[in-house]
Image: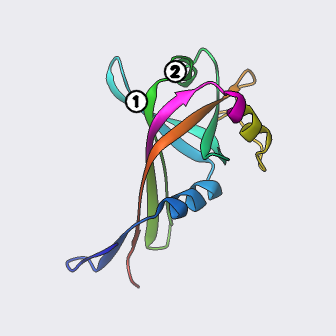
Amino acid sequence: MTTQHAETDLAIRTLSRESCLELLAAEAVGRVGFVGREGVEILPVAYRLGQGPRIFVSTRTWGVVGQLAECGGACTFEVDHHGATSRDGWSVLMHGTLGRLDRAGQVAYAALDRSLEAWPGYRDARPVQFLPRSFSGRSVMRPS
């Protein structure tokens, strides 16, 4: 689906699940969103897309994201990209659950083709997994 906005000559396109997965595979930093004590919190994390699909995040067990994973917390995961000088961009938003690696998660984690580094570089970080139950994505392009 493409929507044209006449006032800005902007093309916004809804992305398929397959397109969302292709874009997610190319990036490495996303954001975990959840409702905390103070309201909505959004935290940047390094990630890798794995089989399933599963999103793997490396975090401290006792940190906020680690504690959310320990309790199997519902959250969102968002990744976006925009060209610094180009006139295009995209965003993928997923709803799902953050949790410890189960058996399938361990297998998928071992099969990653790129290593997962903790961000901002914690030495005691461990992988957890985000299991998406829904995907939504949009891209935007301004004609030159």
Q: Is residue 111 shown above or below 66?
A: below
Query: Residue at label 2?
Result: 64
> Toward the viewer: 135 or 86?
135
Give the percent coordinates (x, y) of residue 120.
64, 33
Residue 34's quadrant in the figure? Answer: top left
Kindly identify the residue that appears in the image at 61 percent across and 33 percent down.
Answer: 129
Q: Residue furthest bottom?
A: 144
Circle number at residue 34 = 1
Kindly identify the residue that appears in the image at 46 percent across and 64 percent down.
Answer: 16
Q: How crowded is mark 2: few (under 14 residues within 10 Å), some or many (20 or more)?
A: few
Q: Magenta span has 93?
A: no
Q: Is mark 1 on a helix, strand or loop?
A: strand
Give the percent coordinates (x, y) of residue 72.
51, 22
Q: Residue furthest top?
A: 62
Kindly identify the residue that appears in the image at 44 percent across and 64 percent down.
Answer: 15
> Toward the viewer: 98 or 47?
98
In three-dimensional space, the C-alpha distance between marks 1 and 2, rounded to whole angstroms, equals: 10 Å
The quadrant of the rendering that contains the C terminus is bottom left
Is residue 116 in view? no
Read off the magenta span: 94-105
The quadrant of the rendering that contains the N terminus is bottom left
> Toward the viewer: 52 or 91?
52
For badge 1, the amino acid type reads: Phe
